[in-house]
Image (spheres, rainbow, N blue to C red):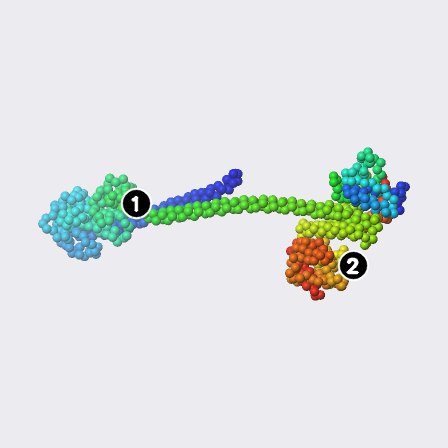
């Protein structure tokens, strides 16, 4: 079980598609875990949140999980993964890739860069919800995550 | 124009010139050598002839001298009883020679002779008389040729002094010899055209001479540059106007033993040049022929080298064009890759969201299935679903061309398992039954074989009689190094005339019946199979349905 004192789970959603952000938020809201979601609309903003660089992110908590889209403007998901794994403070944060692509090359490249999981966004909304809930179950219940910084 | 370019063009001509120079140096050297050999042979031949002539002349004079000496002794023993004609008749030497023998008395008149004498013939003024009259040196005297006063013929006299018992001068024993006896050998031996033979005394007067038809003796060669050389050595070579025929001769001479005479055998110097002329011509012809061949060979080599350079330049140009074409192809591939990425991500994204939110909306509004709004949303979802399937298939279709060829075999059994799992929903929805036999491995990328099976199974599950659950049979056999896979259905089948057309992109057989797919499934199968070195075709299944067969190699090439 989760041993952190704050019972809310912090999830950073990195996606440039507002529709997808809404769907993920809806799915999390319908889940059995209390989640605090943060949103970054591209990779650059995601890194700013993670490193608390901009004034508006200075109080941002360290996420328990990052749901990362791959194709985004300015800084794509692969670049975010690489930057996180090269940063000792961010390297152990679990990152699950959540993307439209089911291209093998993207799957292999994501795992090579240290992704903790890879989910192709399903067409079926219910399926998407089930997938998000499975992720929650896995990361917030089944396994132990590294301690928060 | 680079240094290498110049060197390549100059090398062959220079090499040809060097070979040409070597050829001519060799030919000139061989010509000189042959000329020296011919000259030596020519001179050796003349020398041998001179020895032969000397021996021949010496034999004649020695023989005649013996006769003269014998008759001299006979006469001096008994001058009154001396019978000249009887002695001449008995002489075996004189028997074969047409010579005159006579005795000149001490008063200078011819006493007796083997030739008829008309009147008193005075010979006291002749040198061969006066020389013996003055002294008795005991030697044979060989006179200069004299024109006979009686015979009108040339002759040389071999004379010895006759002595009375008291040693005083008793006359001269004379044997007259025609010079022709000596020069007869000239007729017997072929000395060559314009050859000459000469017998000359130390006084420079020719005793015998034969030069062509000219047999006139008596000329003096005492003023010639080579005369003194005749007496300096036993034999040797002389050059000059030996034959008095107006041509420069070269001759071999030899002094005669015991007698103050020398013999010369000569030939014109032009004859010596003529002997070598033939060989010289041959050498010249060889040189010219060789030069022509060398020049032609060099020209040919140069031409070939230039052609090769031209070919190489063309090849380099072709290589550059190929590299440019390959780069262009790679660029197009990258573009295509990017395009497929766009298909994979950006184009599918809105379709997916459209479907998700349509479903969400339906749920939020709590619409029943028969509600008009629900039907409208259903159309939205169906359209989006179809668009998404189209995008997925187009993406797959385009991606086939960018895949590297497989070299290891795919486990067809395992691939079919995966394909059936992936198509589980489709099969379940259609209530399809799948029968399968054992499948052999084949050379193809495993994921592509999954794509093939999925496309064919989806087709087979979709096209079936409405009142019949689809029956799908997957089998394979080996034939001539190929694995022939078959996926057959129990549907209405595909008419013969459409069996080629259905492999065209977006070609759908019955789009209105609602069962048609994207129109890319079979073209995708065809593209994957052909990229793997195989082929695909359609037959009728045993139940009258469609049977799609595809052949794949079982061994990597």
Q: Which residue of the protein is positioned furthest toward the left in this rendering?
A: B119
Which residue does the numbered mark 2 point to in the structure image? B428
Chain letter of the residue carrying label 1: B
- Nearest the viewer among A69 and B225 is A69
Tag count in the figure? 2
**Lateral position of residue B503 relative to residue B353, left or right:** left
Is B501 placed above or below B321 here?
below
* Location of residue B228 in the rendering, given as x and y in whole percent from the top left corner: 27, 40
Please, what secondary structure does the residue beneath circle 1 have? helix
Which residue does the numbered mark 1 point to in the structure image? B269
Task: Give the residue drawn at x 28%, y 43%.
Answer: B248
* Location of residue B216 in the rendering, given as x and y in whole percent from the top left corner: 20, 47
Q: Which residue of the protein is positioned furthest toward the right in this rendering?
A: A5
* Mark toward the start of the polypeptide (2 vs 1): 1
Q: Residues within 10 Å of mark 1 (few under 14, many from 20)?
A: some
Q: Which residue of the protein is positioned furthest toward the top in this rendering?
A: A55
Query: Would residue A53 be visible to someone looking at this image?
Result: yes
Please, what secondary structure does the residue beneath circle 2 have? helix
Q: Residues within 10 Å of mark 2 (few under 14, many from 20)?
A: few
Query: Would residue A122 be visible to someone looking at this image?
Result: no
- Nearest the viewer among B306 and B364 is B364
* Location of residue B240 in the rendering, given as x and y in whole percent from the top left corner: 28, 42
Residue A48: image quadrant is top right
Q: Mark 2 and mark 1, same subunit?
A: yes
Of the numbered discs in the image, which one, if any, rests on residue B459?
A: none
Task: Give the residue drawn at x 29%, y 43%.
Answer: B238
Of labels 2 and 1, the one closer to you: 2
Chain letter of the residue carrying label 2: B
Task: Give the residue drawn at x 66%, y 47%.
Answer: B333
**Lateral position of residue B232 relative to residue A54, left or right:** left
* Distance CA(mark 2)–CA(mark 1): 123 Å
């Amino acid at each position: 079980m989760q041993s952190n004192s704050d019972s809310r789970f912090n999830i950073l959603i990195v996606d440039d598609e507002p529709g997808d952000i809404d769907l993920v938020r809806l799915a999390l809201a319908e889940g059995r875990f209390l989640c605090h979601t943060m949103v970054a609309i591209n990779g650059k903003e995601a890194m700013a949140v993670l490193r608390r660089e901009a004034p508006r992110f200075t109080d941002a908590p360290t996420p328990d999980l990052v749901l990362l889209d791959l194709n985004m403007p300015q800084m794509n998901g692969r670049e975010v993964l690489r930057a996180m794994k090269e940063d000792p403070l961010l390297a152990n944060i679990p990152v699950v890739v959540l993307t439209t692509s089911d291209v093998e090359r993207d799957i292999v490249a994501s795992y090579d860069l240290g992704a903790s999981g890879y989910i192709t966004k399903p067409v079926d909304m219910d399926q998407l919800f089930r997938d998000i809930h499975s992720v929650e179950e896995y990361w917030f219940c089944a396994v132990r995550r590294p301690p928060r910084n | 124009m680079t240094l290498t370019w110049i060197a390549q063009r100059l090398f062959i001509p220079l090499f040809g010139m060097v070979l040409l120079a070597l050829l001519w140096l060799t030919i000139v050297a061989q010509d000189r050598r042959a000329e020296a050999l011919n000259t030596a042979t020519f001179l050796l031949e003349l020398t041998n002839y001179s020895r032969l002539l000397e021996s021949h002349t010496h034999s004649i004079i020695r023989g005649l001298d013996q006769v003269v000496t014998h008759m001299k002794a006979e006469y001096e023993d008994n001058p009154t009883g001396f019978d000249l004609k009887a002695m001449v008749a008995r002489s075996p030497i004189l028997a074969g020679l047409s010579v005159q023998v006579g005795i000149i008395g001490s008063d200078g008149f011819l006493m007796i002779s083997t030739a008829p004498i008309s009147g008193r013939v005075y010979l006291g003024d002749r040198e061969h008389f006066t020389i013996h009259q003055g002294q008795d040196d005991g030697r044979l005297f060989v006179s200069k040729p004299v024109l006979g006063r009686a015979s009108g013929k040339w002759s040389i006299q071999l004379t010895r002094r006759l002595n009375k018992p008291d040693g005083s001068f008793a006359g001269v024993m004379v044997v007259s010899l025609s010079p022709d006896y000596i020069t007869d050998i000239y007729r017997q031996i072929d000395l060559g055209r314009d050859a000459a033979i000469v017998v000359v005394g130390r006084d420079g007067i020719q005793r015998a001479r034969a030069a062509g038809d000219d047999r006139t003796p008596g000329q003096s060669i005492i003023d010639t540059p080579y005369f003194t050389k005749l007496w300096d050595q036993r034999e040797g070579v002389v050059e000059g106007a030996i034959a008095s025929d107006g041509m420069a001769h070269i001759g071999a001479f030899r002094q005669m033993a015991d007698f103050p005479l020398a013999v010369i055998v000569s030939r014109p110097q032009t004859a010596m040049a003529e002997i070598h002329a033939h060989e010289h011509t041959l050498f010249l012809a060889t040189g010219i022929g060789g030069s022509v061949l060398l020049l032609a060979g060099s020209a040919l080599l140069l031409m070939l080298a230039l052609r090769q350079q031209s070919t190489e330049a063309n090849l380099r140009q072709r290589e550059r064009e190929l590299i440019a074409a390959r780069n262009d192809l790679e660029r197009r591939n990258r573009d295509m890759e990017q395009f497929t990425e766009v298909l994979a991500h950006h184009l599918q994204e809105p379709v997916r969201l459209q479907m998700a939110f349509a479903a969400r909306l339906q749920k939020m509004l709590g619409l029943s299935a028969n509600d008009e709004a629900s039907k409208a949303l259903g159309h939205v979802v169906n359209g989006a679903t179809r668009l998404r399937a189209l995008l997925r298939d187009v993406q797959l279709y385009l991606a086939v061309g960018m895949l590297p060829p497989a070299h290891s075999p795919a486990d067809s059994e395992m691939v079919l398992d995966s394909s059936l799992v992936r198509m589980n929903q489709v099969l379940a929805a259609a209530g399809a039954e799948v029968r399968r036999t054992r499948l052999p491995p084949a050379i193809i990328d495993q994921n592509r074989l999954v794509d093939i099976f999925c496309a064919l199974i989806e087709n087979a599950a979709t096209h079936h009689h409405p009142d019949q659950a689809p029956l799908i049979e997957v089998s394979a056999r080996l034939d001539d190094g190929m694995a022939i896979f078959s996926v057959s259905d129990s549907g209405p089948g595909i008419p013969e005339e459409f069996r080629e057309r259905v492999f065209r992109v977006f070609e759908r057989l019955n789009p209105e019946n609602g069962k048609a797919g994207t129109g890319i499934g079979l073209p995708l199968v065809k593209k994957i199979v052909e990229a793997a070195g195989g082929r695909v075709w359609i037959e009728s299944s045993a139940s009258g349905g469609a049977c799609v067969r595809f052949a794949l190699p079982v061994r990597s090439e």
